[in-house]
Amino acid sequence: MFILSVFIVVPLIFLLFDSLGSVGIRKGPRTIPTAIPTPSPLPTLPPGVPEVSVIRSSPVQDGQQYLPTQPVELTFSNSIDPSRVKIEVIPKTEIEVRAGTIGSSIVIMPARTWATGDTSIIVRPSEFSTGRLIRPYTYLLRTGLPPTPAYEKENY
């Protein structure tokens, strides 16, 4: 009987005090392991709505330096309304967006000039009558002024 009480009664008393918080091995509140975060799903389109994407850019993104007044033309996979394209420019620059050379393109120009150095032109998700652009597109434009030729320095 003594063995029975040692193996059953003592653990029950220990569990009772542990649940009340007066006796126990753990200090502080009990923690429940957190679930592994699930990655956010890729954006999807409703059935029947075509995805619009940027399929061409001009000038080509090749790291070459362009003049600070260089317009950028982006061509989309479907025809779009230029007024509905959401564009962000970093560093912040006032821009003009016009219809491009074909119905599925736009021309983005600075109101004055692009900042010297790297400028990111980000086309944000937008909705058009011909479909939706669901993935942002970033165009990197590198600008600067050409070096002054040696003979011009001598004339001043």
Image: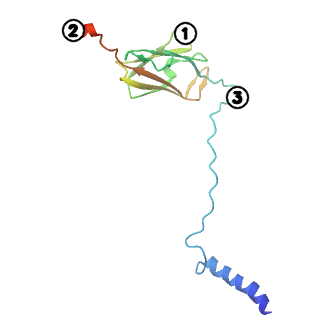
Identify the disc placed on residue 102.
1
Which sits earlier in the primary sequence, circle 1 or circle 3?
Answer: 3
Q: Answer yes or no: do the residues labelled 1 and 3 have beta carbons within 8 Å?
A: no
Q: Left or right: where does residue 94 sit relative to residue 50?
A: left
Between the residue at mark 3 and the residue at mark 2, the CA separation in whole angstroms equals 67 Å
Q: Position of residue 3 (x, y in %)?
A: 78, 89
Q: Mark 2 points at which residue?
A: 154
Q: Name the residue under label 3.
A: 47
Residue at the far left: name it. Answer: 156
Q: How crowded is mark 2: few (under 14 residues within 10 Å), some or many (20 or more)?
A: few
Residue occupying image coordinates x 56% and y 73%: 27
Left or right? Give the position of 72 relative to 1.
left
Residue 125 found in image quarter: top right
Hey, what amino acid is under mark 2?
A: Glu
Left or right of residue 6: residue 66: left
Q: Which of 145 and 75 is in front in this view?
A: 145
Q: Marks 2 and 1, Cα distance to the nearest angstrom? A: 46 Å
Circle 1 Cα neighbour tier, 10 Å, few/some/many (<14 / 14–19 / ≥20): few
Q: Residue furthest bottom?
A: 2
As helix, strand or loop, the secondary structure at mark 3 comes to: loop
